[in-house]
Amino acid sequence: MKNYAQKLDQSAHRGRLIVKSITNIMKTPANRLSIPRPTVNRLPTYRRALENLLASGRAVVSSHELAAEVEVTPSQLRKDLSCFGTFGTAGVGYDVRDLVSRLDEILGICKKRPVLLVGVGNLGLALLNRRPIQRSGFEIVAACDTSPSKVGRVIAGVRCYSLEETPAVLAAIKISIAMLAVPPDTAQETADFLVKNGIRALVNFSPLRLRVDKGVLLEQVDFGYTLQKVAYYLDAMEEQQ
């Protein structure tokens, strides 16, 4: 009888290990880089909507409700999430807090990622004071500028360094992300300098289209481009009236 009980315990233990293994496989895609880019682009939108639901006191949300919040179809929402595992309970929906945590894991923002801000002009100052950046899992921990009037100062709680000091700062704080808020004529040179000194991801606010080596992530934020799209759709809507 004792031997039989031991065998049952061993079988149960193996079963738990198998279930745990399957769960881990479901949570981690074979190749994260193979996930379609539009799917990845929608994840922060889902997360922002869930944060708003949490703030309003919601604990559970259905796929139809969440999809409506972000203006996608429920099937698209479920397809996007299925790339990373199984989510929610059939007939009940998603636990809002749990889904935010799962998305934080997927997006890699469970802990704050340090960011370097390059250029402390009007746009740079606005970015330094933009609290949603902090709430999104990132923290601007250092800034750099070429202006002697700004170098050495603490601006909006962040110390500003010279460009020459930047390599030592990047190494000391282990920064791999930089935001560029510099004039177009210096953007490419600045980007090259940063990549040479260890930056692996650039968010470029300059209208200049940067060229970067393979293996360096580049996100372009162009306000003019966005406004042009707005103008197109605004005219199109007015033509239909």
Image (spheres, rainbow, N blue to C red):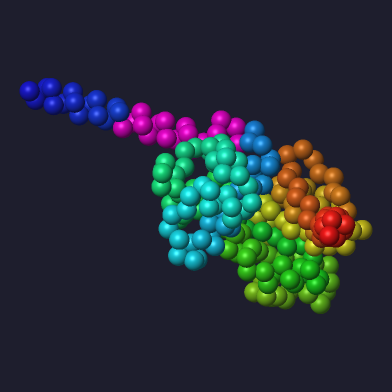
| Residue positioned most to the right | 185
Residue 30: percent from left, percent from top: 56, 30
Residue 30 lies in the magenta-colored region? yes
Q: Please give the name of the residue rendered at 25% of the width and 29% of the height, measured from the top-left corner.
A: 12
Residue 58 visible in rendering = yes
Q: Is residue 153 left or right of residue 210?
A: left
> How would you classify the magenta stretch by its main secondary structure?
helix
Residue 90: percent from left, percent from top: 42, 41
Q: Quadrant of residue 149?
A: bottom right
Q: Give the total number of marks visible in the rendering.
A: 0
Region rendered in magenta: 16-32
Quadrant the C terminus occupies: bottom right
Residue 193 visible in rendering = no
Quadrant the N terminus occupies: top left
Residue 114: percent from left, percent from top: 62, 58
209 or 189: nearer the viewer:
209
Q: In this view, does 188 lie to the left or right of 125?
A: right
Residue 241 lies in the magenta-colored region? no
| Residue positioned most to the front | 241
Q: Please give the name of the residue rendered at 72% of the width and 56% of the height, measured from the top-left corner.
A: 178
Q: Quadrant of residue 115?
A: bottom right
Q: In this view, does 71 lie to the left or right of 209?
A: left
168 or 8: nearer the viewer:
8
8 or 95: nearer the viewer:
95
Up-down relation of residue 211 to residue 230 (above or below): above
Q: Please give the name of the residue rendered at 48% of the width and 34% of the height, measured from the top-left corner.
A: 26
Q: Please give the name of the residue rendered at 60% of the width and 64% of the height, measured from the top-left corner.
A: 134
